[in-house]
Image: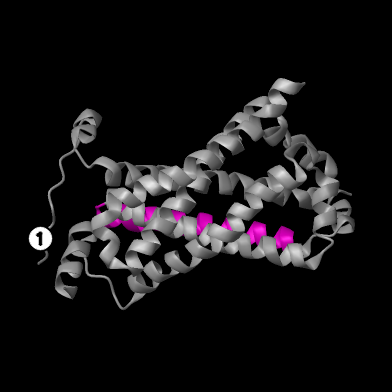
Amino acid sequence: MNGNLNRAFVNRRGRVPRGNFELYSWFFMRISGVVLLVIAVFHLFYMHFAIGVDNIDYDLVAERWGNPLWKVFDFFLLVFALTHGVNGFRAILDDYVHRPGWSVFAKSMLFLVYVALLGIGAYVILTFTPEAAQAALS
Amino acid sequence: MATRTVYRKGVPILEGLRYRGREGMFAWLLHRASGIGILLFLALHIVDIFLMSFGPELFNALLVLYHAWWGRIMTVFLLFGVLFHALNGARIIIQDFWPRLWPHERTLIWIEAAIFLPIFLWGAYMFLLPLFQS
C-alpha cells in the first residue's frame, strides 16, 4: 500500500516524499476544513446578513477590534484560511508543475506570498489601534 | 531511477469534458476552481484589511470593492464558492473517515446539492436585493 502511494508521488514529483509531512498535511486539511466550515461560513454570513455590507466602514471595523475576542476570532480565521488555501494550492502545483526546477521555484514563490500575507494580516490585527493608524499617516 | 509518467501536452478541453466522470468529476473540478477563487479573494481581502493601518480615508475609499453593484455581483460568486467548498469538503471528510460510504458517493453529492441550492439561492437573493431597491 505504502509502495503504491510512494509510486504515485514519484510520478507526480519525481521523488519520494520525506517523513510524514504529507500525512500531517492531509490531516491538517481535514481539521482546518472543519474549523473553517464553522468560522469562515459564519464570518461571511455574519458580515453580510447580521451587519450588512453597506454598514461596513473604517469605524465599524475599528469598533469591532476594540473587543479582543473579535481580534482573536479574526486572527484564527486568517491563519486557518490562509494556511488551508496555500496548502491546497501546493497540491494543485504538484498536479500541474512536474519539472523539479519549476516545482521548487513555484513553491518557493508560493511560500513567500504566504509569509507576506500572513505577516501583514497578523500585523494589522495584532497592532491595530485607531491612534496607531492616525500616527502612521502623520 | 524512478520512471516518470509521460504527460500529453495540449489535451483539448473538449476531450477533458468528454471524460465521463459524472458527479464525482464535476464535484472535484468545482472544488478545485472554488478553492483557487477563494484563495485569490482571501489575498485581496488581507491586503484591503491591512489598509486599516493607514487610517479611514484610504480604507473607506477602497470599500467600493464591496459596495459597488459589480462588487455585490462578485460577492454572489464568493458565496457560491465558499458554500460549495464548505459542503463538498464536509462530504470528502465524511467519506474519508467512513470509507464504507465511498460506493454511495453520487448519492451523497446529490444530497449535498439539495442542501447547497436553497441556501445559495436565498443568499444570492439577499445579496442582490439592494440593487433593485434603490
Is the N terminus of chain B in the top left, top right, bottom left or bottom right quadrant? bottom left
Counting from the top left corner in percent of width and height, residue B11 is at 19, 34
Across and down, in percent, residue B78 comes to 55, 40
Residue A78 x %, y %: 61, 59
Q: Can residue B15 be seen?
A: yes
Residue A55 vs A75, above or below: the answer is above
Vertical placement of A9 versus A62: above or below? below
Disc 1 marks which residue? B3
Quadrant of the snapshot with the C terminus of chain B? top right
Amino acid type, callout 1: Thr
User: Where does the magenta region start and end?
Assistant: A98-125
Residue B33 magenta-highlighted: no
Q: Is residue A85 left or right of residue B133?
A: left
Q: Based on the displayed image, in which of its 4 quarters is residue A42 positioned? A: bottom right
Can residue A106 be found in the magenta stretch?
A: yes
Q: Name the residue nearer the viewer: B133 or B43.
A: B133
Describe residue B19's horizontal placement relative to residue B23 as left or right: left
Question: Which structural element holds mark 1?
Answer: loop
Residue B106 lies left or right of residue A75; in this view the side is: left
Give the left or right position of residue A110, taking residue B25 as reference.
right
Question: Residue at the spot x=82%, y=46% of the render?
Answer: A58
